[in-house]
Amino acid sequence: MRGHSRSAVVLDVSPLSFTCALGWPDIQGQAHLKTALREDHGGLEAGRFARRREMGTLVRKLYRKTLAQAGEKAQGLYVSVPNEYTQVYMRVLELPVYGRIQASDLAELTAMARETPVPPDYRLLSERPIAWQVDREMVYRSPIGREGKLVKGYYALIYGYNPYCLDLADIVDEAGAALEGFVSVSEALMRYAAKKLNLLGTFVLMDSDALSTYVMAAQRGKLWLMKPFPIGTERLCQDLMQFLPADYEQADRKLRTMRLGPRVGEDSPAARAVEGRLHELLIKAGEELETSGISLSEPIHLVLSGGGWTGLTGAADLAARQVKAKISILTPPPRGASIHSIAMLDQVLSHERPERSWWDEFKKRIIQSNH
């Protein structure tokens, strides 16, 4: 193995499978995917795997196979915190300054953000300043050096479900790999979308998997809102089964070949049922966003990602009929990688490595308690 000096390996955990991907930054600093492999794991619910005892062996085989196929070496891997095990809160904190804003003032605001009470069973993964307000002026770049009397920090606090994180840490350890850190899928996906589509203002992303659709909002790629809706491809397949003499697997295959939308759509009760469910999703998403001051009736950018959108022919045209937002679709890269895994690679390679401070501190406490 030749071992690329900046290669990284990520493990994307979905409700039904693992995707292990290896990549490195290319000459332009973009994440370059080398290899991605996928394995089913039998199901994940409430942070626990249906076949928990098998997970260490499964991850070890998948990790080693990924390295062997890529012809690379790696010190360890980054593990995803899926959307369903993530919570996002916006907090507004303020600090009197009475003069020129210093770096120490922003550091104090960040310290205040870290001290915000944590939801039960969750752990702080990151605190990101989305924007600042100096007196009455909103600022989206660092306000250091500006004059003012009061600075407000708008912080997105991203939390991961602690039992899930601890269980995955044990699984990675059983697999004989080093845990490099956890990556919030929602945060990585929004950063990736902003970079890929050159989105500088507020935009909305709807990420759909087998079980749910997550509606997220970001400012310059910084996630500050996420709401789940229990409408995913499983619900669409159940809708199909009411109109077709088919079992679930047959309905899933039919869903992948169905054509939707006003231009190429099928004129059948089954197709109308799926279209009706997607209309319902867009209405519910729009209502939730409006409570946060965002309207899909305005010409903002709406990004669609995940199997619930990219696997449906005509889904973007269907959405365009219902909203005025400009619509883009994030398509997964070739060679079997999920859109989540390439977004994770982009974050750990092209942006910044996720902090491990909470994990290191937790291990220290365990060591201290044993002495």
Image (cartoon, rainbow, N blue to C red):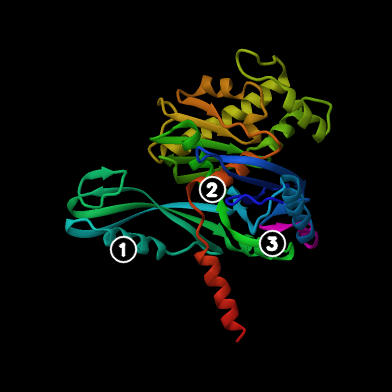
Return the residue at label 3.
177
Residue 182, compared with residue 312, is above or below; it is below
Task: Provide the secondary structure element on which disc 3 rests.
Answer: loop
Q: Is residue 104 left or right of residue 57?
A: left
Nearer the camera: disc 3 or disc 1: 3
Magenta part of the protein: which range? 47-55
* Mark 3 surroundings: few (<14), some (14-19) or many (≥20) residues within 10 A: some
Task: Please name whichever residue, 8 or 207, is drawn nearer the observer in this view of the structure.
Answer: 8
Q: Residue 247 carries which label?
A: none
- Whether residue 230 appears in this view of the structure is no
Task: Name the one closer to the observer, 53 or 240.
Answer: 53
Is residue 315 shown left or right of residue 49?
Answer: left
Sequence-wise, which precedes: disc 3 or disc 2? 3
Pointer 1 local density, CA inside 10 Å: few below 14, some 14–19, many at least 20: few
Marks 2/1: CA–CA distance: 28 Å
Quadrant of residue 257 within the rendered picture: top right
Q: Residue furthest front?
A: 2
Residue 114 magenta: no
Identify residue type, mark 3: Ala
The residue where tag 1 is placed is 108
Q: How many marks?
A: 3
Residue bearing mark 2: 349
